[in-house]
Amino acid sequence: MSDPHAYDPRFALTAVDDPPLTETGVMLMGLDAERLLAGLGMAALADDPAQVALTVDRAKHGVELRLTFDALVEAGVVRWREARTALDALGGAGAPPASLRKTWERTLAMLDDCDLGAVGPATAAHLAACWLRHQEVDQRAAERGAPQGE
């Protein structure tokens, strides 16, 4: 590196011994709330975070699937609303540390303490990302209206 003052630690690569889900989390944090909700909806069907992200991207870009992007978002909104009470019971997201990767790891650990039922890796990844961006996700879920039957 020619200029040591130009180094920006926000873009540092992950350590080789970090769990693969950490980098998935960094990628998920770059998605908009609607895609996060669609991913959460898809996770109920196929709980592999990489496959979920690819399927959501395909749906977003119009690749023909059995489920539409809107259907995935709606399923994600339902799952988000189910999980929200358990997440709120932990007392909020707290102040984020400087490192996105540390924030991600802390959030995944927090999910272990929640009463969320059976949660596979894709569901955990998308719930963590939704929780870290809960203001946007809550707003997007509210735009979808009240759940059926309310």
Image: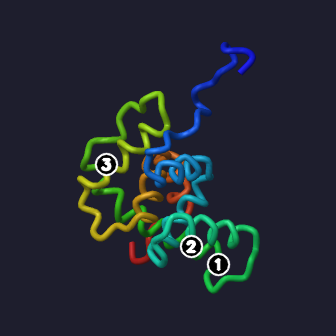
Picture coordinates of residue 48, whole percent (x, y): 49, 69
Closer to us: 117 or 13: 13
Residue depth check, mark 3 versus mark 2: number of the one nearer the observer:
3
Name the residue: 48% across, 54% down: 20
Disc 2 crowd, CA 10 A, few/some/many (<14, 14-19, 20+): many
Picture coordinates of residue 5, whole percent (x, y): 67, 13
Closer to us: 118 or 70: 118
Q: Quadrant of residue 55?
A: bottom right
Asked if labels 3 and 1 touch by Cβ distance under 8 angstroms, the answer is no
Label 3 vs 2, first from the N-terminus:
2
Mark 3 sits on what residue?
109
Image-based side of 4 in relation to 90, left or right:
right
- The amino acid on which the numbered mark 1 sits, given as a three-letter code, is Thr
On residue 68, the disc is 1
Disc 1 crowd, CA 10 A, few/some/many (<14, 14-19, 20+): some
Name the residue: 44% across, 70% down: 147
- The amino acid on which the numbered mark 2 sits, given as a three-letter code, is Leu
Kind of element beneath mark 3: helix
Name the residue: 45% across, 72% down: 47
- The amino acid on which the numbered mark 3 sits, given as a three-letter code, is Ala
On residue 72, the disc is 2
Kind of element beneath mark 2: helix
